[in-house]
Image (cartoon, rainbow, N blue to C red):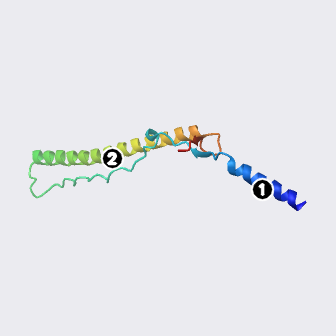
Amino acid sequence: MKLSMLAVALSTFCLAACETTRIMVPVAPPADRIDCRELDVRPRIPAEYVIDWSRVVTVEQARAEHQAVVASVRAREGVAAGYIVELEGALFACASDDAWLRDLYGGADAPPLRRLEPG
């Protein structure tokens, strides 16, 4: 009995050793679907214009100073708004890629596999 068990174990080992080993690896997503990136450093917001009221003596000077303040504020807002739009665009691209990858790998417990050929 022990001899037959040894023969079965030995033959199973020999058959297992002779089989071709198949290696399966996950399919890598396309590079254009992995373009999430960090934005560069935050932009520098220019200093706000400050009116020197000691120099303002006429209504025309006050209007000119007011216009300078408004232009300064608009310039500051433009820098911040541009950064927000750039940030939103980067987040949209990343979220779009995430949704695409979710749909690609959806319904499977693991990413799709491909057979890795020896050699």
The answer to which of marks 2 and 1 sits earlier in the sequence is 1
Q: Position of residue 72 (x, y in %)?
A: 21, 48
Which amino acid does the dot numbered 2 rest on? Tyr
**Helix, strand or loop at disc 2?**
helix
**Quarter occupied by the N terminus:** bottom right
The residue that appears at 79% across and 56% down in the rendered structure is 9
Q: Residues within 10 Å of mark 1 (few under 14, many from 20)?
A: few
Q: Residue at x 53, y 40 (%)?
A: 101
Residue 73 left/right relative to 11: left
The residue carrying mark 1 is: 10
Name the residue located 10 percent from the left edge and 44 percent from the top edge. Answer: 60
Q: Amino acid at mark 1?
A: Leu
Residue closest to the eye, 115 or 60: 115
User: Could you give the CA–CA distance between mark 2 and mark 1, rounded to whole angstroms?
Assistant: 69 Å
Q: Nearer the viewer, residue 19 or 110?
A: 19
Dot 1: element: helix
Mark carried by residue 83:
2
Residue 102 position, x and y percent, is 56, 41
Residue shown at 28% from the left, 44% from the top: 78
Left/right of residue 1 with respect to residue 55 in the rendered view = right
Between label 2 and label 1, give the one nearer the viewer. Answer: 1
Q: Residues within 10 Å of mark 2 (few under 14, many from 20)?
A: some
User: In the rendering, at what x and y percent does residue 59 appear?
Assistant: 12, 46
In front here: 115 or 80? 115
